[in-house]
Amino acid sequence: MEFSVNHPILYVLVGIIIAVVLAQSIYFLARALRRAKEKGIDPKIIKSTISSAAIFTIAPAIAILVGVVALSKSLGVALPWLRLSVIGSITYETVAANNALTALGLGAGETITDPSVFVTVLWVMTLGISIGLILVPFVTKKIQGGMNKIGMKDKKWGEIFNNAMFLGMISAFLGYVFCDVGLVFKGDTSGLVPVCVMAVSAVIMAVCGILSKKLKARWLTDYALPLSLVGGMAVAIPFTNWLA
């Protein structure tokens, strides 16, 4: 049987897994509704909470869809759909997949035809993200407790510590963006493409943040990520044609 990244059996397997996840969501939603009624919570509040949560789920869903589209050229639709629908992260999955493809001598947009390559990329994406699931039960309580102690002693330093941890995480991805900038000194400007794309995405994100405060539009904050992603992908095309 000829291998294909979009073979129907992959959709069946992924569909089963996602169906289980959806069943869990429905189960806990039903339990939450039953408990809310037992507590005597106003039905209007319950409906408002459900509708608000459903509406604000659209924003991250758009970002996930962008990630699926970005990875579908090389990995098909089934695998990105699975990885970004369960415990995946768009900032991790795209980097992990591209790194694995590069290590195997393939381009980011090159379709996989070798099943061994497909399985290798799958394992890289899966094992990398699973580390968080393993570490959370063992280290989260200690880290959170330490952060709470710092915050209780000095609120300002607690905020600085939280921001420093966040910036440390972001810096790991910045290395991926700037790693090929040095090629400019060799006459190759292709390394500037991710830098320019990141700059445009950052500007879009900043504009969304400013407008959300000026216009007092909280919904704009929730849609800032997908807007910056889509905007970055859109400008990547002309930047690639210009610099690569």
Image (cartoon, helix red, strand yellow):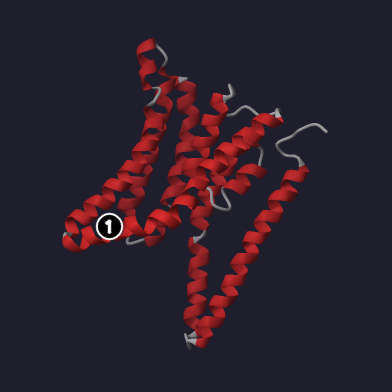
Residue nearest the viewer, comparing 123 with 195 = 123
The percent coordinates of residue 30 (x first, y second) are 59, 76
Residue at 32% across, 58% down: 144
- In front of the other: 14 or 111: 14
Q: Quadrant of residue 25?
A: bottom right
Residue, disc 1: 146
Q: Position of residue 197 (x, y in %)?
A: 42, 33
Amino acid on which the number 1 mark rests in the picture: Gly
**Looking at the image, can residue 89 be seen?**
no
Residue at image point 68% right, 59% down: 19
Give whichever of 219, 60 is nearer the camera.
60
Using the rendered view, name the quadrant where residue 23 is placed: bottom right
As drawn, 166 above or below 74: below
Outermost residue toward the right in this view: 1
Q: Locate residue 46, reporting x and y percent.
A: 50, 79
User: Considering the numbered disc 1 on the image, is that residue within a helix, a strand or a loop?
Assistant: helix
Q: Residue at the location (35% across, 13% down)?
A: 185
